[in-house]
Amino acid sequence: MTSPDPHGAEDEGGSGDLPPADHRALYAPFRPRYARVVVLTLAVVVVVLAAALIVALPGFAPDSDPLGDQLGVGLVAIGVVWFCWRQAAVRAEVDEQGVLVRNLLFSRRLEWPEVVLVRFGQGRPWVQLDLADGDTIAVMGVQRADGAFAVREAERLATLVALHSRTSRDD
């Protein structure tokens, strides 16, 4: 049986008796701010410019068949928009059992005992998790470009790791 400590956390993991609002705030998803705005704006610009170019292409070379060029522009635009969408979708979702890290190309689910340390030192573009197996994983959902907000988010993630790695021996 576990007993709550004075800080509201249970000795063997869990979030103790946090009020619902505090629990929601602590377990809110980690998402970048500025990168999302930039890449979503870029995606809109690419769609508008690609559409304009596709419409205008037949006028540039009326004697040729511009279908191949139009198709090429469309495919490049789709690729850029897909990349922007993936960048905007990076995040880390946390719950009582662990963290789901969704980065640009890959996603990985980690249980709390797998996470040993949260790093966000100078020069790191993203938070980095050191894992019990000696591996590391970047958490692109917390990005240095977000400044003080990113530092607070890294601290919140470190708090979650500490909260869920606490044992009755507290080692």
Image (tube, grey):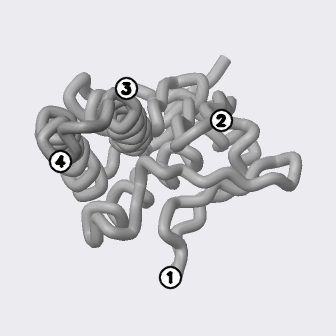
- Which of the 4 image quadrants contains residue 62? top left
The reply to whether discs 4 and 2 touch (Cβ–Cβ < 8 Å) is no
Quickly name the residue at label 2: 112
Quickly name the residue at label 1: 122
Q: Dot 3: what SS? A: loop
Where is residue 119 shown, x and y percent of the image?
A: 59, 66
From the viewer's side, name the closer residue of 133 and 165.
Answer: 133
* 3D distance between C-alphas at marks 4 and 2: 59 Å
Where is residue 26 shown, x and y percent of the image?
A: 34, 38
Along the polypeptide, which appears first: circle 1 or circle 3?
A: 3
Considering only vertical position in the picture, is 122 above or below 31?
below
Comparing labels 2 and 1, the label whose residue is closer to the camera: 1
Q: Dot 2: what SS? A: helix
Quickly name the residue at label 3: 17
| Residue for point 39% across, 69% down | 144
Q: Which amino acid does label 2 sit on?
A: Trp
Q: How crowded is mark 3: few (under 14 residues within 10 Å), some or many (20 or more)?
A: few
Comparing labels 1 and 3, the label whose residue is closer to the camera: 1
Quickly name the residue at label 4: 60
Along the polypeptide, which appears first: circle 2 or circle 1?
A: 2
Along the polypeptide, which appears first: circle 4 or circle 1?
A: 4
Q: How crowded is mark 1: few (under 14 residues within 10 Å), some or many (20 or more)?
A: few
Q: How crowded is mark 4: few (under 14 residues within 10 Å), some or many (20 or more)?
A: few
* 3D distance between C-alphas at marks 1 and 3: 35 Å
Along the polypeptide, which appears first: circle 4 or circle 2?
A: 4
